[in-house]
Structure formats: C-alpha cells, structure tokens
C-alpha cells in the first residue's frame, strides 16, 4: 500500500510542476490494441504486464487527465500518465529532454516480506529520455465513465540512465471526473 501511495504522490507532484503548460495534440496514430475493462496492459522487454482493476484509475479535471495502474504484489509494476491540455480523443505525444506537459512513468517496486516498510523502487520517466519525441498515447474512446486507447513510449532512469521500452500498450479504464 505504501508503494501505491508513493507512486500516486510522484504522479501528483509531476502534475503540479507542469500544470501551467499546455499539451500538443495530434490526430490519429497510436496503433491498435485492447485491454479488459478496468485495466492497463503493456509490454516491457516483451513481458506482458496487466494492472489490477482495483488499482487502476483515471481522473479528469478541467483540461488535465491522470491515469495510473499497478499490478500489486511484492514485485509490483506500475504505470502512470499525466496529460495536460486534454481535450478529448486524439494522440498526445511524450517528449524527452524538455519540460513537457505530457508525461509517462513506469515503476518497479520490490517489497521484502522481512522488511515491508522499506521497498526498493525504481522509476523510468519519459522526461528523462535524452531524445525528442519518446512515444505517444492515443485516446480512441472517451465517455462519461471510461477512457480507452493505446500507447507506447521509451523512458529513462535518472540514476543509472537505463532505458525501458514500453510497447503494445492499451487501456480501458474507469474515468472519475
């Protein structure tokens, strides 16, 4: 639970620091894919990951959309997105090495049962990547209760400069407004 709260805090801090910016939106793109209702699915190094429905959510307030999900367990995988200037269906790019309003983050958390209050957490961020456009998220369907779409991105860890390639991403997430 502590790691979920920590991950949520990281996502919200990113939102606060970029809330004054607007996003770039383009039509089309993003590829195809689907996820079961209430989940986010994606691949990291060809390993498929699916978040739990209970830990997966999206929030929309004004022109901001935050979406996140977590696999839970002692070796949890989590993903989060912050889209600024969100105005509906379409494709929103992620950029690296610049201050950008659209961000994606992939996190791995390992919890030792012998010391559950001291988890090991490693994150990879699209903003840390030293290239231009690092990927995109496409919203293909938006209703008053759900968002659906696809995504892919490259992200970098600030500590060791390792890169994670997130591919074949899809989401079908309950939307809270």
Image (tube, grey):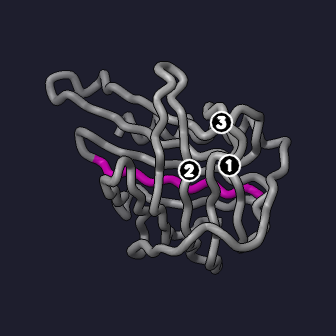
Distance CA(mark 3)–CA(mark 1): 8 Å
**Labels 3 and 1 touching (C-beta < 8 A):** no
Tell me the CA gap for discs 2 and 1: 7 Å
- Tag 3 residue: 127
Residue sitting at 41 percent across and 41 percent down? 4
* Displayed quadrant of residue 117: top left
* C-alpha gap between disc 3 and disc 2: 11 Å
Residue 3 on image: x %, y %? 38, 36
Q: Secondary structure at mark 2?
A: strand
- Evaluate if marks 2 and 1 touch, with contact meaning CB atoms under 8 Å apart: yes
The picture places residue 162, in percent across and down from the top left corner, at 46, 29
User: Which residue is found at the position 34% from the left and 54% from the top?
Assistant: 46
Q: Is residue 71 magenta?
A: yes
- The residue that label 1 is drawn on is 94
Q: Position of residue 177 (x, y in %)?
A: 66, 66
Q: Which contiguous range is marked in magenta?
A: 63-72
């Amino acid at each position: 639970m502590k790691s979920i709260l920590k991950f949520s805090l990281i996502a919200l801090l990113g939102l606060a620091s970029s809330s004054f910016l607007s996003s770039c939106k383009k039509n089309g793109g993003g590829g195809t894919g689907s996820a079961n209702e209430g989940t986010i699915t994606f691949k990291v190094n060809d390993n498929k990951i699916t978040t739990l429905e209970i830990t997966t959510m999206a929030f929309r307030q004004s022109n901001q959309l935050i979406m996140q999900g977590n696999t839970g367990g002692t070796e949890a995988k989590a993903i989060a997105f912050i889209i600024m200037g969100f105005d509906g269906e379409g494709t929103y790019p992620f950029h690296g090495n610049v201050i950008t309003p659209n961000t994606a983050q992939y996190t791995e958390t390992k919890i030792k049962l012998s010391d559950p209050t001291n988890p090991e957490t490693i994150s990879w961020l699209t903003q840390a990547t030293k290239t231009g456009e690092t990927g995109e998220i496409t919203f293909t369907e938006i209703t008053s209760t759900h968002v659906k779409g696809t995504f892919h991105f490259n992200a970098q860890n600030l500590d060791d400069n390792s890169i994670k390639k997130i591919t074949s991403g899809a989401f079908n997430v309950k939307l809270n407004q």
